[in-house]
Image (cartoon, rainbow, N blue to C red):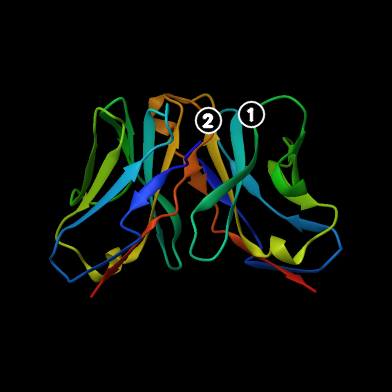
Amino acid sequence: EAGVTQSPTHLIKTRGQQATLRCSPISGHTSVYWYQQALGLGLQFLLWYDEGEERNRGNFPPRFSGRQFPNYSSELNVNALELEDSALYLCASSWGLGQETQYFGPGTRLLVL
Amino acid sequence: AQSVAQPEDQVNVAEGNPLTVKCTYSVSGNPYLFWYVQYPNRGLQFLLKYITGDNLVKGSYGFEAEFNKSQTSFHLKKPSALVSDSALYFCAVRDGESGAGSYQLTFGKGTKLSVIP
């Protein structure tokens, strides 16, 4: 069974640009979660999608947004990039609303110059 | 609000010795507790979880964890450490009795485990 996949593996952008990160969940999983792992800040929850709807978002500004497609894959968009957005962005998926175990992808490392 | 504390930034243990990585939590309802491991430049791998039932939970790669409700702890243990266990370990919690707004996990800061040959 294929795991969670993310693309690209690395992304280099400059301040003010937009970044788009993609995630494909494990087959059959309907929930997708996004987390940011920045140096010194640990893992912080960004967004949660289930059945195409945004269910919850963490304490991040509106320039962090995303969506979930009918095939349950997901996209994270970060607008007006700032230097402090440099981090590893991790996507996780689970079976559905309230299902407890989240399985993580390898992440996308975003570097903002 | 839910929170997790991993009081040790780093744990060093000799190969073959038992290891313990500590975790304490705070939630308003029943805790769902998890341990994940992260190798350098990789995502998180699920090790084990406690939802309900036996307080001693067994997981992948010989790891186990003990849920202690009175001490609000969920320490990760392994009887005999391997050099290949060296990695970053994260404890996570979510409130099992909250509504839809709380399904995301709250993670501790992580503990770096170094197993010395």
Q: Quadrant of residue B11?
A: bottom right
- Work out whether B54 lies above or below A3: above
Q: Quadrant of the C terminus of chain A?
A: bottom left
Q: How many marks?
A: 2
Question: Mark 1 near mark 2, Cβ–Cβ under 8 Å?
Answer: yes
Q: Amino acid at mark 2?
A: Glu
Viewed as shown, does residue A73 lie left or right of A91? left
Between A13 and B19, the residue placed more toward the observer is A13
Q: Disc 1 and disc 2: Cα gap in Å?
A: 8 Å
- Work out whether B63 lies above or below B51: below
**Do the residues at pointers 1 and 2 share their chain?**
no
Chain letter for the residue marked with disc 1 in the picture: B
The circle drawn on residue B51 is 1
| SS category of the residue bearing label 1 | loop
Residue B89 location, x and y as percent? 62, 56
| SS category of the residue bearing label 2 | loop
Q: Amino acid at mark 1?
A: Ile
Q: Quadrant of residue A96?
A: top left
- Work out whether B65 lies above or below B9: above
Viewed as shown, does residue A11 lie left or right of B40? left
Provide the residue designation for mark 2.
Answer: A100
- Work out whether A7 lies above or below A41: above
Viewed as shown, does residue B48 lie left or right of B15? left
**Picture residue at 68% right of the left edge, 41% below the top:** B72
Q: Few, some or many C-alpha atoms within 10 Å of disc 2 (few <14, some 14-19, many ≥20)?
A: many
